[in-house]
Image: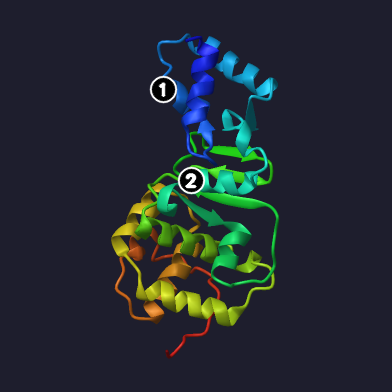
C-alpha cells in the first residue's frame, strides 16, 4: 500500500469528529516513513481536499467538513471526560455566572497542547505547568478569577460571593501548593485566596507563599451565611 493510501486509510478509520494531530499520527503508526516525506504527504492531501486542515499540524477527515470546527477543537483540547482542559478568561467567568458579558474569543489551558501556547482562529490554548486533574483545575480556576477580579467586566458581586464560598468549601490545600509552586501568580492574588479561605475558617498553608513584611491590597467581598 502506498504511503498516501496508508494515510487516507488512517483517517478513514478514526471516529467521526476526531481532530488528528499529525505529530501523534506519525509517532503512532508512521515512524518507518521518512518524517519529512510524511508531513509533506499529509500537507499534499490537505491541499487536494482529501483531508481538512483545522490548525497547525491538525486535521479532520473530509466527511467532517460541515461540522462545527470550534466545537471539534474544544473537544480535542478538553479531552475525554473534560479531563485535559479548562476555560480561562470570559468563558471561565461565564461558567460561574460571574458576568453576563460574552466573547467569541476563547482562551483555555490544555494538557493536550504540546507547545507553551498555540493560536487557532479565535482559540488561544496554553499548556499549564501541572496536570489538570479535578483538584488542580479548581485551584487554577480560582487563581484566574482572583487574579483578574478587577478586570472581570460587569462583575456580579453576589455571584462572586457565592463562588468564593463554594470554592472555600471544596478547597484542597495539597493541590493549591502543587499549583502555586509550579505556576506564576501574583502574591496579592494568593493573598486574596487566603483571605477567602480565612473568612470561612478553612485551614490552609498559603502563608508560605506570602511575606509577613508585606501588606497585600485585596478586594473586599461579602461573606455568605449560607
**Snapshot colouring:** rainbow
The one of 35 and 187 positioned closer to us in this rendering: 35
Q: Identify the residue shown where x is 42% and y is 44%.
A: 129
Residue 170 percent across, percent down from the top left: 35, 71
Quickly name the residue at label 1.
Answer: 27
Q: Residue furthest bottom?
A: 225
Residue 186 percent across, percent down from the top left: 50, 57
Label 1 Cα neighbours within 10 Å, binned few <14 / some 14-19 / many ≥20: few
Could you tell me which secondary element the residue under label 2 belongs to? strand
Q: Identify the residue shown where x is 40% and y is 11%.
A: 32
Q: Is residue 53 left or right of residue 216?
A: right
Q: Nearer the viewer, mark 2 or mark 1?
A: 1
Q: Is residue 145 left or right of residue 130?
A: right
Q: Is residue 226 depicted above or below 79 in this figure?
A: below
Image quadrant assignment for residue 52: top right
Could you tell me which secondary element the residue under label 1 belongs to? helix
Residue 147 percent across, percent down from the top left: 54, 62
The one of 129 and 85 positioned closer to us in this rendering: 85
Quickly name the residue at label 2.
Answer: 110
How far is disc 2 from disc 1 in space, using C-alphas?
Answer: 20 Å
The one of 131 and 27 positioned closer to us in this rendering: 27
Amino acid at each position: 500500500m502506498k504511503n498516501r493510501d496508508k494515510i487516507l486509510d488512517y483517517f478513514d478509520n478514526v471516529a467521526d469528529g476526531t481532530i488528528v494531530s499529525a505529530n501523534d499520527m506519525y509517532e503512532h503508526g508512521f515512524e518507518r516513513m521518512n518524517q519529512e516525506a510524511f508531513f509533506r504527504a499529509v500537507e499534499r492531501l490537505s491541499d487536494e481536499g482529501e483531508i481538512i486542515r483545522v490548525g497547525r499540524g491538525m486535521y479532520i477527515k473530509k466527511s467532517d467538513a460541515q461540522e462545527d470546527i470550534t466545537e471539534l477543537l474544544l473537544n480535542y483540547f478538553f479531552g475525554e471526560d473534560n479531563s485535559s482542559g479548562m476555560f480561562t478568561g470570559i468563558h471561565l467567568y461565564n461558567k460561574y455566572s460571574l458576568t453576563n458579558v460574552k466573547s467569541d474569543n476563547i482562551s483555555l489551558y490544555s494538557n493536550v497542547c504540546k507547545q507553551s501556547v498555540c493560536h487557532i482562529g479565535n482559540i488561544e490554548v496554553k499548556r499549564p505547568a501541572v496536570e489538570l486533574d479535578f483538584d488542580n483545575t479548581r485551584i487554577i480556576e480560582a487563581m484566574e478569577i482572583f487574579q483578574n477580579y478587577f478586570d472581570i467586566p460587569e462583575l456580579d458581586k453576589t455571584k462572586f460571593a457565592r463562588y468564593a464560598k463554594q470554592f472555600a468549601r471544596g478547597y484542597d490545600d495539597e493541590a493549591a501548593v502543587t499549583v502555586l509552586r509550579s505556576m506564576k501568580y501574583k502574591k496579592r492574588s494568593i493573598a486574596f485566596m487566603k483571605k477567602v479561605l480565612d473568612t470561612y475558617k478553612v485551614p490552609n498553608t498559603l502563608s508560605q507563599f506570602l511575606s509577613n513584611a508585606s501588606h497585600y491590597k485585596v478586594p473586599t467581598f461579602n461573606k455568605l451565611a449560607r
